[in-house]
Image (cartoon, coloured by chain):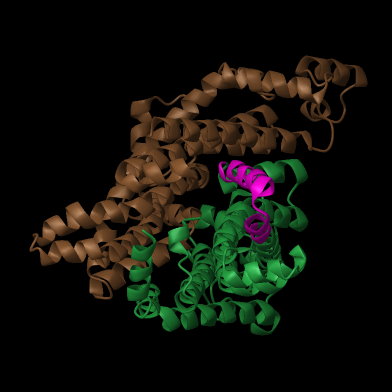
Chain colours: A brown, B green
Amino acid sequence: MLRMILIRLGTAVLTVLLAATLVFLAIQALPGDVAQQVLGQDATPAAVEAMREQLGLDRPVWVRYGEWLLGLVTGDFGTSLVTGEAIAPELGIRLRNTLMIAVPTFILGVALALYLGLVAGLNRDKTPDRVASGIALVGMSIPEFVTATLGVLLVAVTFPILPAVVIDGDQASVVELLPATILPIIVLTISMTAYILRMTRTGVIDAMASEFVVTAELKGVRRRDVVLRHALPTAILPTLNVLAINVAWLIGGVVVVEAVFNYPGLGSYMIEAVHNRDLPVIQSVAVVTAIIYSLANLAADVGAMLLDPRQRTRQEAS
Amino acid sequence: MSTEAKTSEVLDSPTEPKQKRLRFGGNGTLIFGLVLIGLHLLIALLAPVLTSHNPYISDPDAALYGPSATHLLGTDQYGRDVLARTLYGGRYALQVTFIATTITVAIGSALGILCAHLGGWFDMVIMRLIDAILAIPSILALLVVVTVFGNSIPVIVFAITIVYTPAVTRVVRGAAMAVVPLDFVTAAKARGESAFAVVLREIVPNVPGVMLVEYAMRASWAVLLISTLSFLGFGANPPTPDWGLMISEGRMAMTVVPWSVLAPIIALSTLVIGLSSAADGLSGRLGVDRLSKGA
């Protein structure tokens, strides 16, 4: 089991490395000269040359690639082209702000989805199921920027208690940001619950139809115990992978929601960087999200091994 | 183990199709979805007939009007007719979605089938690459591509292809994996048929269900992604009538002329609901268990 976890860990590191390489290569494909872009069109050739040297663009691609990777490992993300300051501290603050939205959303979304999925799955094709499935379909189909926009409209018109957008984002402390996280959390939870709910529902239906649940029922085990002890662990198993995918989705959704609410997180950092063509920042944010996603996948795999004894042995052989 | 698996298979098989149809809602969902998609295609095609207003022309004197006889849904802050812009608004998204999804499913299916058929090194390298791309959230990957190459339609199509091909490859590979060890494939190989013939004649005809469901599903995601991109200001260029762009532009005057935001929201949502219902209905009818594949 430990060996398998180590193998997975190795795969995760490899995936992050590959993702970082792909992003680096994509940025290298940028047409035009970065130094020229930073300085603008009317910069003198001498100034551009000096800038190139300062940015290290005069050295071969693979040297820069190596240095960049080495920097990543030691926690040095380079410097922003726009502010000229180190990226790492700013990245840390943005990541913290985003986690303030992402973590509560994840917990809330999973809890809601598990509960609703269980209710829907146990009452298949009855009213609760139809209502839950219908809501899930609508929740999945309405993009986050729409829910967010409607949220702002609702707050602006009816309940002016919550702040709709963050005005002074960059300097805000954790406590000051707290009220601003409520609306983004609600918006993201709606979409996320919709995604996971469908999966849990299917898992519950499959588990309840399985032989071991029927056996448990025939043995006269209480309904509650049948559901919670026998059916649920099996039902959660296929959901785990979906959870990992949802973490990636969550980071993507955060980009949009942060843009709507002007929330100073990782997502709006990325959007600003794209607007300013601040390449080192774009690279850094992409790598950070790849790391988060790989960690989530790793956690899902380990979780699956803990829940399902078969996985501990079966994949060892392959 | 093998006998056990066989018994449960035999026990399950008679009830399985029925169960699947029930689980996904079946024909009703499919028809509902197809009707919505058809409606949107018709509106996009017939937009010039359905409204006499030009969706591009702004009229500062007629800005921010409420609904009236001349402007059924009122006007936006530039005085453009909201109904006309909503009717035309699907064209950009539908066009890009259609091209991008077709390419994505074609490349993804080809790669997935090749991976399943060839196995070995090819399979491993492709799967690793796919994991790496999937590790970057689609909207971020899209933003990176748009930063590098700009936001013309070919670039956005290319970006969506990059973002969604890995997922399609994975799902189709999974479906093809189930076909490859079957006897008729082995027989074809034993007959000495070329790899090309084996793939085309033996494997491809057995995975169209998965491909069709993937098509509907990816299309619904692509519509969402394209309008999100437009909303963020990296997709359709103003003054193109596009739902994402309309919602973004209308936000400022949302409380004054709510229809300038609500109309594109309703249009966008019904299209996506149509596409995902179609995907659900298809997977129910064809017995493709899309959910359990996760991606």
Q: Is residue B169 visible?
A: yes
Q: Quadrant of residue A313?
A: top left
Q: Residue at x 77, y 66 (%)?
A: B194
Which segment did they paint magenta? B112-135
Where's residue B109, x and y in %? 65, 62
Where's residue A301, x and y in %? 41, 42
Tell me: residue A86, above or below residue B133. Answer: above
Where's residue B191, x and y in %? 72, 71
Q: Is residue A291 part of the magenta span, yes or no? A: no
Q: Total of numbered circles in the picture?
A: 0
Where's residue B173, x and y in %? 59, 58
Tell me: residue B166, above or below residue A220. Answer: above
Main secondary structure type of the part rendered in magenta:
helix
Screen quadrant of the N terminus of chain A: top left
Depth check, front residue: A90 or B246: A90
Tell me: residue B28, above or below residue A275. Answer: below
Tell me: residue B259, above or below residue A314. Answer: below
Q: Residue furthest right?
A: A45
Q: Quadrant of residue B50?
A: bottom right
Q: Is residue A264 visible?
A: no
Depth check, front residue: A151 or B293: B293
Q: Horizontally, is A98 left or right of B75 in the view?
A: left
Q: Quadrant of residue B63?
A: bottom right
Q: Horizontally, is A5 left or right of B167 in the view?
A: left
Depth check, front residue: A220 or A122: A220
Q: Residue at x 70, y 18 (%)?
A: A67
Q: Is residue B117 part of the magenta span, yes or no? A: yes
Depth check, front residue: B75 or B215: B215
